[in-house]
Image: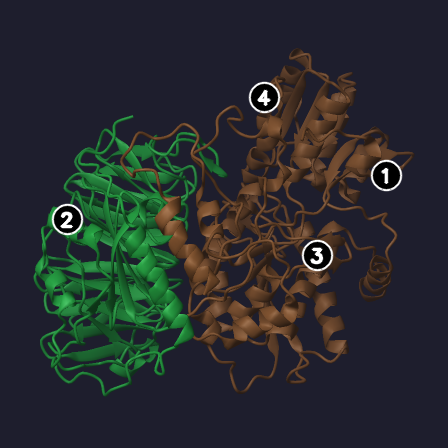
């Protein structure tokens, strides 16, 4: 079994931990008078952000780690909730496109315009065909917004009009749609009873189930497209790869074939019940409720919470940014494999007591640095996420978070600028949209 | 505070293995153990503490309540553990799943006329892809519906939902539609009907679809009729099952056949649907792991009435016993055709064959048949007697297993609603963190870490024109651990 390149043993975290323990003990003795920043009126202009975060306790280990290189850490976040115009605060999906950010919720669709800092929303009374929007994909050619409706089929939002596709008027295989993706002229829908592929030019539908695809089970959960390949994450059937050129299928299953164990970490998909897939730079990332994994075409690598620092194995979704960076939507926080070669992970959580944001940086499972922030993710139950250039959008069980990637860099940097900023937080930066 | 320190220590000291290092052959820990360090487990939580905790936290907090932790999954004996000679890298389903969302902070609605509980079951016949043609489980679904109705009616007679003095209402949906239609029914129950919890269903495929939807919409789902082991092997914190599954029955049959009777060669005949396929999985695995692999496994299409092809091949395999996994009528016809062919092997079957349909068709051939069974209906229990009497009075017939388990399942939901109030997450919580087994008419229902019924299962043997129920202890069946 080949070890990851660039493995480094960073010892001496004890002092960091001790200082954290002391900090935690202090917090317990002296609870903050106000658990969160006092509510302020919603932001009136988009660029205004919460004050920069304070640095976590630092020591020689952290300094050494900083010198070796640290990943980019998002220290500036903005939150969106009902008060900001969202139709519901349980966010199922988020998809940025240009200056717009499309937001699917349990009860309605919303669109946030970053340029004007305005939010528009649609409910069923406004023509949205069904209340729950579980998946969103934007056709890059037309800008049409395709919506996976959880129990209501598929909808296209174009020119202010909703077109509704469902089991009784189209080739959609089932109305419970979990995810959608655009592949060339096709829109794919991952449904609870198979996958549908709709040719937006010829209007032809194709249906994929156990009849014509290697689906041991047909409970599709996630779909993505990149570089000529469509990948389906299927509950009970692992991952299926569809080659667009040849229309041939390839299946990826858990080699041990057992539900209650993962026999070997790196022998294949960690579990046959998968929840999402992301294929970027010819690297396949897979999430499940049992852990996550990465496949480079030759080697699999299982990613489990207990040895990486990721917040949990229960993973609702994921989105890769590159071959070496992937973001995971866990039930206990946001996990980021920030630099795969160096085994560096960043987790973003909301402290349940102070309600402040927190980022933990791990390398090879060891905690290097904790960054305390006024804001981080809205809630620790992360449902979906998406990247928007250097920014990131995080859908949670209670609100939407916008991570501002000012100065974002991939991989690692020595003594990065964000670290200097959190060590010396600016004092006069205005606080905006601090509700929640 | 103790949890915080424990958690930090875990981070510092527990993750000593390098992420990129060579994979250890026998890792010292698993995810369950890692998580267990942050929250205590297997500490019985008094109900008032559970309520205090879930009622005192805000939307951004998760309750700090003890979690269930099982030292072995599903009572699996060492000799039938998968890859038993190798320590797996990770073991699942040992530590109870948490619900960490914001659902506990959703306020109760102000005005309600009734407290709705959803029911999804096969109650109307229809052609179904999921069930392999014409549906065949209405007989089970209708019994489930009776059990649910009786539980609701009794709760209403006792004052309904006590906190508001309003009645419970059962919202009934059929699940025999095309494959996948059950998902839409769950969505509609959750979003449109706004039920507080759902009971259902029978068909394994439909139930899997239903629980995936329940996870997304965050609603408790009680299952009383789908014995597919994989149903609970999904890490969904919203699904609870109140009946012993096929895995438990298979373990009992395997232990009886091999450890007790010391048979060597067994054949399987099963339905070619999900129920048959998954039902015999543990028999296949258990037989192989005990060094006596199943000699032959034959599947038949639903609706078939001539099983001669399958039986000829099984006879040619020279087996000592035949195990059937499928519906009652099929099981009886297979038995009759076996005996007509002169096959005298012992006949074992799944719990579905313990039914009037089976006896009507099998007649005298039923004598000596042994079925796995999730409970002991001969148990002396005042609750069971009262249930039987009420059921007879209400429906004019004897309750059977699906009615009894559904009655228990709906009563568990009613208890949870009365206890937790009108909040789906809290309804889930009080069931998931209940420290005592639920006293059902089918027996005590202790929930495992996976929230599955971890109670005893039984073998039923047809003797002298009646079924006799035997526990593992009754028959002296070794466990293997």
Does residue B246 show up?
A: yes
Query: Which of the pair A188/A72 is nearer the observer?
Result: A72
Colour seen for chain A: green
Circle nearer the viewer, 4 or 3: 3
| Relative image position of residue A260 (x, y in whole percent) | 50, 39
Residue B288: image tag: 4
First-in-chain label (4 vs 3): 4
Tally the marks: 4
First-in-chain label (1 vs 3): 3
Q: Residue at x 69, y 65 (%)?
A: B411
Residue B159, located in which quarter of the rendered image? Answer: bottom right
Query: Which of the pair A80/A143 is nearer the observer?
Result: A80
Residue under pointer 2: A184
Q: Residue at x 92, y 34 (%)?
A: B464
Residue under pointer 1: B468
Question: Are tags 2 and 4 found on a single chain?
Answer: no
Residue A215, located in which quarter of the rendered image? Answer: top left
Q: Residue at x 67, y 50 (%)?
A: B243
First-in-chain label (4 vs 1): 4
Question: Are tags 1 and 3 found on a single chain?
Answer: yes
Residue under pointer 3: B437
Chain letter behind tag 4 = B
């Amino acid at each position: 079994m080949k070890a990851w390149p660039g493995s480094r043993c960073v010892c001496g975290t004890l002092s960091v931990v001790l200082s954290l323990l002391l900090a935690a003990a202090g917090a317990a003795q002296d609870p903050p008078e106000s658990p969160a920043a006092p509510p302020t009126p919603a932001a009136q202009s988009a660029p205004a952000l919460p004050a920069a975060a304070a640095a976590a306790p630092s020591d020689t280990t952290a300094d050494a780690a900083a010198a070796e290189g640290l990943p980019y850490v998002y220290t500036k976040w903005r939150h969106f909730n009902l008060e900001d115009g969202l139709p519901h605060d349980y966010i199922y999906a988020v998809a940025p496109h240009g200056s717009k950010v499309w937001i699917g919720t349990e009860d309605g669709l919303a669109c946030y315009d970053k340029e004007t800092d305005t939010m528009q929303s649609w409910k069923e009374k406004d023509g949205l065909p069904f209340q729950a929007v579980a998946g969103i994909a934007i056709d890059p050619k037309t800008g049409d917004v395709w919506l996976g409706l959880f129990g209501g089929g598929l909808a296209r939002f174009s020119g202010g009009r909703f077109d509704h596709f469902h089991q009784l008027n189209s080739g959609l295989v089932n109305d419970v749609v979990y995810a959608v993706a655009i592949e060339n002229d096709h829109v794919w829908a991952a449904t609870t009873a198979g996958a549908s592929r709709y040719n937006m030019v010829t209007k032809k539908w194709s249906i994929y189930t156990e009849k014509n695809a290697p689906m041991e089970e047909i409970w599709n959960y996630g779909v993505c497209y990149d570089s000529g390949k469509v990948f389906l994450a299927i509950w009970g059937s692992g991952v299926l790869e569809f080659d667009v050129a040849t229309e041939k299928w390839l299946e990826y299953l858990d080699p041990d074939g057992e539900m209650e164990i993962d026999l070997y970490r790196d022998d294949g998909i960690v579990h046959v019940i998968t929840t999402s897939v992301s294929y970027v730079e010819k690297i396949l990332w897979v999430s499940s409720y049992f852990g996550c994994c990465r496949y480079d075409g030759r080697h699999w690598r299982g990613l489990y919470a207990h040895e990486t620092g990721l917040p949990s194995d229960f993973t609702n979704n994921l989105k890769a940014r590159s071959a070496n960076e992937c973001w995971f939507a866990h039930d206990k926080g946001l996990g980021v494999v920030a630099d795969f070669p160096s085994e560096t992970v960043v987790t973003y959580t909301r402290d349940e007591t102070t309600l402040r944001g927190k980022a933990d940086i791990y390398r090879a499972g060891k905690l290097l640095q904790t960054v305390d922030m006024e804001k981080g993710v809205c809630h620790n139950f992360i449902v979906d996420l998406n990247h928007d250039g250097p920014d990131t959008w995080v859908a949670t069980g209670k609100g939407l978070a916008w991570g501002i990637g000012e100065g974002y860099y991939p991989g690692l940097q020595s003594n990065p600028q964000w670290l200097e900023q959190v060590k010396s937080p600016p004092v006069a930066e205005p606080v905006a949209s601090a509700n929640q | 505070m103790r949890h915080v320190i424990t958690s930090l220590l875990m981070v510092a000291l527990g993750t000593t293995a390098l992420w990129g290092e060579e994979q250890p052959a026998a890792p010292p820990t698993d995810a369950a153990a890692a998580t267990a360090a942050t929250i205590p487990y297997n500490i019985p939580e008094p109900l008032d503490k559970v309520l205090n905790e879930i009622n005192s936290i805000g939307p951004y907090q998760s309750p700090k309540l003890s979690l269930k932790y099982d030292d072995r999954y599903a009572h699996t004996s060492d000799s039938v553990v998968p890859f038993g000679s190798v320590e797996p890298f990770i073991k699942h389903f040992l530590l109870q799943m948490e619900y960490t969302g914001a659902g506990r902070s959703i306020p109760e609605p102000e005005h309600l006329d009734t407290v709705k509980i959803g029911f999804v079951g096969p109650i109307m016949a229809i052609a179904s892809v999921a069930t392999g043609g014409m549906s065949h489980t209405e007989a089970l679904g209708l019994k489930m519906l009776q059990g649910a109705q009786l539980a609701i009616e009794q709760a209403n007679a006792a004052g309904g939902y006590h906190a508001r003095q309003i009645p419970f209402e059962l919202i009934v949906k059929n699940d025999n539609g095309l494959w996948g239609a059950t998902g839409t029914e769950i969505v509609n129950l959750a979003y449109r009907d706004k039920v507080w919890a759902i009971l259902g269903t029978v068909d394994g495929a439909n139930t899997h679809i239903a629980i995936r939807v329940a996870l997304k919409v965050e609603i408790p789902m009680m299952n009383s009729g789908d014995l597919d082991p994989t149903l609970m092997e999904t890490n969904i914190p919203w699904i609870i099952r109140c009946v012993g599954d096929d895995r438990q029955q298979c373990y009992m049959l395997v232990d009886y056949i091999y450890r007790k009777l010391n048979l060597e060669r067994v054949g399987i005949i099963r339905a070619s649907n999900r129920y048959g396929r998954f039902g015999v999985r543990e028999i296949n695995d258990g037989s192989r792991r005990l060094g006596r692999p199943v000699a032959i496994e034959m599947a038949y299409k639903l609706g078939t009435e001539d099983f001669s092809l399958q039986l000829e091949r099984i006879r040619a395999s020279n087996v000592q016993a035949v195990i059937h996994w499928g519906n009652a009528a099929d099981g009886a016809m297979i038995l009759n055709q076996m005996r007509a062919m002169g096959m005298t092997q012992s006949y074992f079957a799944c719990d579905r064959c313990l039914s009037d349909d089976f006896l009507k068709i099998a007649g005298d051939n039923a004598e000596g048949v042994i079925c796995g069974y999730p409970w002991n209906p001969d148990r002396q229990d005042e609750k069971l007697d009262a249930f039987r009497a009420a059921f007879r009075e209400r429906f004019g017939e004897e309750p059977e297993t699906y009615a009894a388990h559904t009655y228990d399942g709906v009563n568990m939901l009613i208890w949870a609603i009365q206890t937790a109030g009108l909040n789906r997450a809290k309804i889930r919580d009080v069931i998931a963190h209940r420290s005592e087994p639920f006293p059902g008419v089918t027996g005590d229902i202790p929930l495992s870490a996976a929230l599955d019924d971890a109670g005893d299962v039984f073998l039923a043997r047809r003797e002298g024109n009646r079924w006799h129920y035997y526990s593992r202890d009754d028959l002296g069946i070794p466990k293997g651990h």
